[in-house]
Amino acid sequence: MAVRRDQAALVRRWQIGAVGTLVGVGLLGLGLYTTAAEHPLSALGAGMMIACATTVAGTLLGFLFGIPHSRSAPQPSGQPDGQPNGDYSANTNLEQVSDWLTKLLLGVGLTQLSRIWQGARQLGHALAPALGGRADAAPFAAALVLYFLVLGFLAGWLATRLLLAGVLTQADGNALRLFNSAQEQLREGNEVGAEDLRVQAMAHMGKFSTRAMGADPQRTAAMDAQVAEVRAGAKQSTATPEEVRGLFASDDSGLRLQALALTQGNPGLGDFESVLEYIEHPRTPFEHYQALLAARGMINRLGRDQRIRLRAAVVAQLLAPDGIPDASDRRWVAERILAKLDAIGQVPTPRPSGV
């Protein structure tokens, strides 16, 4: 394994070195050519911009051609082929766009081969004045564009194949581990913990554009771990509902999170009025998210009037301009709360449009 990693690192160094050498050769050729121009610095600047523009265009093409394709996980026995394994699957929109653009570019290129050469000549003549306007400026400009276009394509393709595939594999692997952990939590009866892990897994897959995180991601991760630890031991906790109610009323955010975590792990310890207050008047996005999780775990213990009030509070947060943002983890949990309330069938209020 170590030998394979060393070989991969050596190959990567050679690839980076080769691309760097080719860039250097191209820039050296440009520099030598522009020294004979009437205004060498102006010609050199124009040539650099042409090289940069064509490199960027080539890199984009290389990226489109190099996007890796996700492989479907093996289907469990008895599950039809083509069906996603579990409730979630990787988003392949980027792959589809890449395939569509690749086929379009290839199709146009093959049908317009006779015009490509003519277009290259016209481009060379158009760029020739920027490189000094000499008699050989047009072919040099065309060669410069072709050189850096191909170089950008190779660099973009290699970078996409070497880096993007590993990043996507790691993200999907993390998401899969979280989904598996969520299933284990569900089997153990920890519905709220399973929901939290599913949300984290979908965040790894890029499902949410907004997450209930503070300014410091490390501190948020530490708070996540603290909440999960307290939630896991809530059923063995010696805390009383009165003590948890006191934690809810604390000015210390850590104690408030402890109260929410205890409620998530053991809904019998929770105080509905406090949780509802946290949903209606959130202090931070993170506490808001944890309060929504706590409310989801309490639904089965609530009376009809409490369920109606909970639904009204969640809907109000979804519809408020400064409430729960779209494509966020909080919106996911809020909609799961509404779905569970609808499934119980004891909340007659119709769901507003768009929610």
Image (cartoon, rainbow, N blue to C red):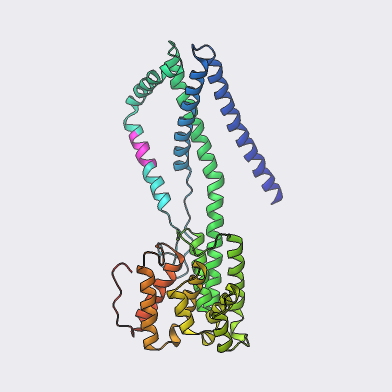
Residue 218 percent coordinates (x, y): 61, 61
- In the picture as drawn, the residue positioned furthest to the right comes out as 2
Above/below status of 11 relative to 85 = above
Q: Is residue 300 above or below residue 134?
A: below
Query: Would you say 89 lies left or right of 104 here?
Result: right
- Answer whether residue 91 is magenta in the image: no
- Locate residue 287, reporting x and y percent: 51, 71
Q: Which image quarter holds the C terminus?
A: bottom left
In the picture, measured across the screen, residue 1 lies left or right of residue 31, that is right
Please tell me whether the stretch drawn in magenta is mainly helix, strand or loop: helix
Residue at the image position 56 percent from the left and 56 percent from the top = 170
Front-lying residue, 160 or 285: 285
Q: Residue at x 29, y 72 (%)?
A: 352
Q: Residue at x 36, y 78 (%)?
A: 312
Does residue 188 appear in this view?
A: no
Residue furthest to the front: 251
- Say whether residue 106 is visible: yes
- The percent coordinates of residue 128 (x first, y second) are 42, 17
In the picture, measured across the screen, residue 350 lies left or right of residue 159, that is: left
x and y, in percent, of residue 323 in the image: 40, 67
Tally the numbered discs.
0
Question: Is residue 229 depicted above or below 152 in this figure?
Answer: below
Q: Which residues are magenta?
A: 102-108
Q: Nearer the viewer, residue 221 or 205?
A: 221
Residue lying at 52% horizontally and 65% vertically, measured from the top left:
200
